[in-house]
Image (cartoon, rainbow, N blue to C red):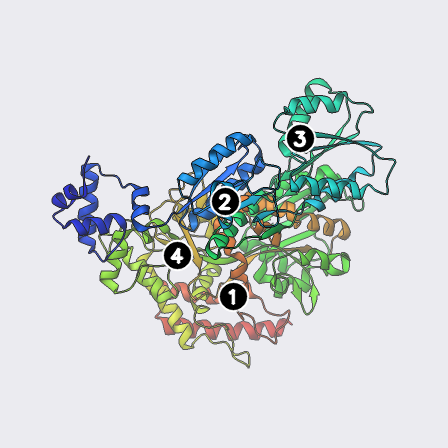
Amino acid sequence: MATIKDIAQLAGVSHGTVSNVLNGNGKVSSAKILAVQKAARELGYTIDINARQLRKGGSNLLAVVLPNLFDRQYADFYTSFENYAQTRGFRTALYISENNLQKELEQIRQIKQTAPYGIAAVTSYEGTQDIYAQTGLSGEEILYVEHCPNPACNSIGFDDYSCGRAFGEKAKQYRCVALVTSASMRSSQQECIRGFREALADTPECYVQTFEKNSSIRAATVSMSIFSCYPQPEAVFVTNYGMAQSIRNVKECFFPERKVRIYTLSPIFTMPENDFVKYELNYRLLGKEAAQVLLEQVKTKQTGRHTTLSNYGFRCWSAPKVGHAESLTMLTLDSPTAHLMEDMSQLYRQSTGTQIHVSIFSYDSIHELLNNLDASNTFDMIRLDATWLNWFAKRIYEPFDQIDPDAAALMSRMLPGIAAEYGMQDGTLYAVPETPSAQMLFYRQDLFEDNVYQRLYKERYKTELRPPENFREFNQIAGFFTRKLNPASPVAYGTTMTLGNTGVAATEFLTRYFSLTDTLFDDRDRILLQSPEAVQALELLTEDKQFAAPVYCNWWRDTAKLFAQGDVAMTILFSNYASEMLNRESRVHTKIGYAMVPGGNAVLGGGVIGVCRYSKHKKEAANFIRWLCSEEVSTAMTLLGSVSPCKQTYENYQVIDTYPWLSMTEECFATSHIQRCPRKMKGGYDQRQFLSILGLSVMQAINGTMDVRTALATAEANYHQFLAETGKKR
């Protein structure tokens, strides 16, 4: 086997240089890094990760003990636990106890020999002793999950008492029910049982039969007992999702004629499934929080810490039927969400009987159509670009809060602060945020973290290679990763440009402009298109042309697909189009890094939806909008590639693990402070027309037919003409 000495000899460098390169330490020139890596490859040398960690001192290992990975909740838990640990530089080791205490005790001894940083355990032990501490492990190293042996231990879990109460409330409608628990001496099960019985304390006519599934009793045996007992339960309440599946299988195979409703505690299901009535608990969030808590408690040497997460509860995919509309028609601009709505609306039809017809128009044609909308139209709902709300809200929408008395409750479940940007006009709610999105920076994380390119960049620019914080840094990095300017670049282009029409071209300019200032207007509503910030923004954008692919992307979907091909170092996208980077042909799906847009002042976009003022079915249309913007439906659509307005979606780690950049969404909205409309022109400012004026000048500057200052002066002159014409129309 090759040694470090062999590598040093072949590479023509010192032993110490090889050690620094292989361990990522020290200041080594890019030429020497390349030489060492080439020699290591030729000699077939592999780095011993465990040995490297021992040399650095300390352990980066987290042990996880689970009963199994067959039950969906444990797979969810471990997925998020491992993902969080890896982002913090920790490895995980998984131990499966099979709910066998003797096996778990043996595993504890094995774990202790690996000297882990910490342990998270869904233990099979039911008592009050700290069995991990008995082997010599300290209390702060252990986090018990879903069970707290005693107050001195650290634990994390859900509000089990509330689970039981919720089950008990549902049980009141039946004369006979079965309650099926697992390991009833565990603290979580005891709390659930207590909540269940207290909820039924005032309902003596409901007869409860109890069954326990523990490590010595097979699930099939318990399931058969439920259907063999007398009186026969009308409903079964189960505290373990895997057990609920066993009960359903026994029923379908042996007792298909029995009508029994099965309620179960369950992990989150982002897509609908018609198998059980699920009381859902966010096990992916539990995994992430458990990893975070474990790292904190070990660092602070804390014991006796008990963390309780909120329950999601009974989530509902159906909608109440309101009125008698056989069908509703929605007008929408083309986007990834438009086509998803067509598919998801079938669920609405199943529960209400109302068919939803989705009419999809292009960005330009829908604007023209809406400008000429009158009582002869056939649309019940209209979904449009959020930037058009100022111009169209009072022209096309019926105030939503006048149709739906519960509109405030709906908005309270949305991301903080988005109502003003995506629904309100002069204090009235006209539309509902449906797909709020923000610009973000996406980059090739593998390139930014590569030792060779980090060193090459530092040698050239005397600064670290990192995600750019402003557009001067952005352009510098884009130039570094453009092969025609830097032959050592592993990709052809440093960035992308989205210039398919005047509207998107203007947005590319505004992205850079708002990285320098917050407003397009002064205190007297005079536009600032010839300000130093405007000149600098357009200069930065025109400079980008030499770093971008020669064929401009028509729309952000095209930009995302170009980045997915793997030959671009960075791109700026709206979050509702970013899922396109993970398409079937993507070459970067495991290599994507993300950050705030340079300047930290993201341009916002996305869609809003409201009830057409000319609709003959306003209440029915509002009912569909409430359903469409509910957490359940919005989260499912987000998993399929859209984005959600609901706060709770961003706690769903099936979504976040799929699209990790969405974890930054709330921060993007919170830090965006942009004044893009004149303050005094309420309801009278057509942003689409303004963007066309601005975008035309931007494209002329980029193509070299006008210099930057002339282009901006032309845009300002055309803007004043546009204002004059708008004033005449008003």
Question: Which residue corresponds to the image point at 62% horizontal and 62% vertical from the top-left?
Answer: 389
Between discs 4 and 3, the one toward the N terminus = 3
Between discs 1 and 4, the one toward the N terminus = 4
- Dividing the image into 4 quarters, which one contains the N terminus? top left
Determine which of the numbered discs, if any, sits on residue 81 in the image.
Answer: 2
The one nearer the camera, 19 or 574, is: 19
Mark 2 lies on a secondary structure that is: helix
Residue 554: x percent and y percent? 44, 52
Residue bearing mark 1: 671
Question: Which residue corresponds to the image point at 69% horizontal and 68% vertical from the top-left?
Answer: 427
Residue bearing mark 3: 244
Residue type for callout 4: Met
Mark 3 lies on a secondary structure that is: helix
Image quadrant where residue 485 sits? bottom left
Specify the farthest residue to the right.
Answer: 205
Between discs 3 and 1, the one toward the N terminus = 3
Q: Is residue 398 visible?
A: no
Determine which of the numbered discs, if any, sits on residue 497 in the image.
Answer: 4
Q: Residues within 10 Å of mark 3 (few under 14, many from 20)?
A: many
Mark 1 lies on a secondary structure that is: helix
Question: Which residue corresponds to the image point at 50% horizontal and 65% vertical from the top-left?
Answer: 691
The one nearer the camera, 26 or 680, is: 26
Question: Which residue corresponds to the image point at 46% horizontal and 57% vertical from the top-left?
Answer: 440
Q: Residues within 10 Å of mark 4 (few under 14, many from 20)?
A: many
> Which dot, 4 or 3, sits closer to the camera?
3
Q: Left or right of 118: which side holds 184?
A: right
Residue type for callout 3: Ala
Q: Residues within 10 Å of mark 2 (few under 14, many from 20)?
A: many
